[in-house]
Amino acid sequence: MRSVLTIGSLNLDYVYQVPHFVRPGETLEASSRSIHIGGKGLNQSAALARAGVSVFHCGAIGEDGALLKAHLEHEGVNADFVRVDAERPSGHTVIQVTPEGENSILYFPGTNETLEEAEILSAVRGMEAGDLLLMQNETNGIAQAADAAISLGMHVVFNPAPWKDAAAELPIERFHALIVNETEAAGLLKAHGRGADSPEAVVESLGALYPRTTIILTLGSEGAMWRLPGRSPRRQPAFRVEAVDTTGAGDTFTGYAVRAMIEALDAGDPEAGATLFADGIYRAAMAAAISVTKPGAAESVPTLEEVEAALEAHEAE
Ligand code: RIB
């Protein structure tokens, strides 16, 4: 099976239970605080590993972040390219979670923004043609990593989260897949002088900008829409669950969606690939739904067995 290299963030998530998001000028008491393992990169690597994919992770932590690397290793992710920086603190977040399970995230990048070109290149060069490179937007070095991976014949999957305007300058037309939420999609379309007023129009418009790239638009509680190159947009509704904490649900979906891409690439013929991809997105939607029923980010990702059991139960209803 193809392997995935994630070049991505590792964060300590400080999660506060609050009655509502703190308002300007307000001092608000939190009813609890817990520290969780997070970072969009780490969460997506954990989701890939729990989905049964072979994963390598490249990133940087401070000495305060030893448990982040240990967590990846515990999940079976190869973390040889996670560097420990003795001088700087790890990336961290302050996350407010409301009684409805909604979150609001303040992100401090720390070591995530200190990746060196040499370490990025050696991580990429350790992979093989046909493998996948997965990146988000919480580290530096995205353009160099993408260039090196494409030269090697790897498939680049990009999730420009959180949105920064510089992402629109990347050669997304050369990427295998783009995974965006509505904010990120609007940022990309605006940068190209476009707009779109429905999820279907967003996917069509991104597909026109990047015709050879698989586009996935995540829609939170409304599920997701996607478009494979040369095909019409498809919709995957979300599974209805009681939300406890939505943090990391998008990352869970992304990890499982990348597994779907691997299955489609391995299918050989495009028709079989498209069917396997749709099945994989169905599975990714269930994985994301299960993750919101549990607190935390990386720790809330379900295993492939849990996802399959939940789908069987859902289909038997
Ligand atoms: O996507 C959720 C993640 O975003 C959290 O784990 C937090 O660390 C931020 O990176």
Image: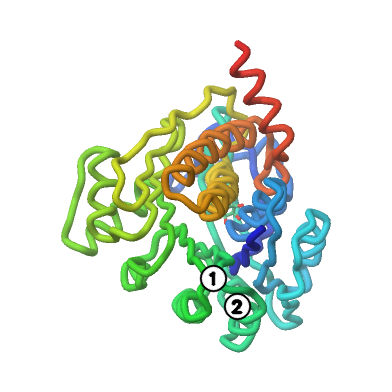
Judging by the rendered image, the residue that carries numbered circle 1 is 139
Kind of element beneath mark 1 = loop
Residue 42, how many percent across, how many down?
65, 59
Looking at the image, which residue is at 36% across and 36% down? 234
Residue, far front: 269
Q: Is residue 277 left or right of residue 92?
A: left
Left/right placement of residue 134 relative to residue 180 reads: right
Report which residue position mark 2 lands on: 124
Residue 248 appears in the figure: no
267, above or below 125, in the image: above
- Pick whichever, 92 or 243, lies toward us: 243
Q: Quadrant of the C terminus?
A: top right
Badge 2 residue CB within 8 Å of ligand 1: no
Secondary structure at badge 2 equals: helix
Residue, far left: 193
Q: Nearer the viewer, mark 2 or mark 1?
A: 2
Q: Position of residue 76 (x, y in %)?
A: 79, 57
Q: Nearer the viewer, residue 218 or 304?
A: 304
Q: Say whether marks 2 and 1 touch (CB < 8 Å).
A: no
Q: Quadrant of residue 127?
A: bottom right
Q: Is residue 246 in view from this perspective?
A: yes
Check disc 1 and give the amino acid type.
Answer: Thr
What residue appears at the point 65 percent right and 57 percent down from the top-left corner? 45
Residue type at mark 2: give it: Val
Kindly identify which numbered label has been placed on residue 31: none
**258 above or below 128?**
above
Q: How is the image coloured?
A: rainbow
Could you say where residue 164 lies in the image, as x and y percent from the top left?
A: 38, 65
Q: CA distance from mark 2 to mark 1?
A: 15 Å
Give the crowd class for mark 1: few <14, some 14-19, many >=20 residues within 10 Å: many
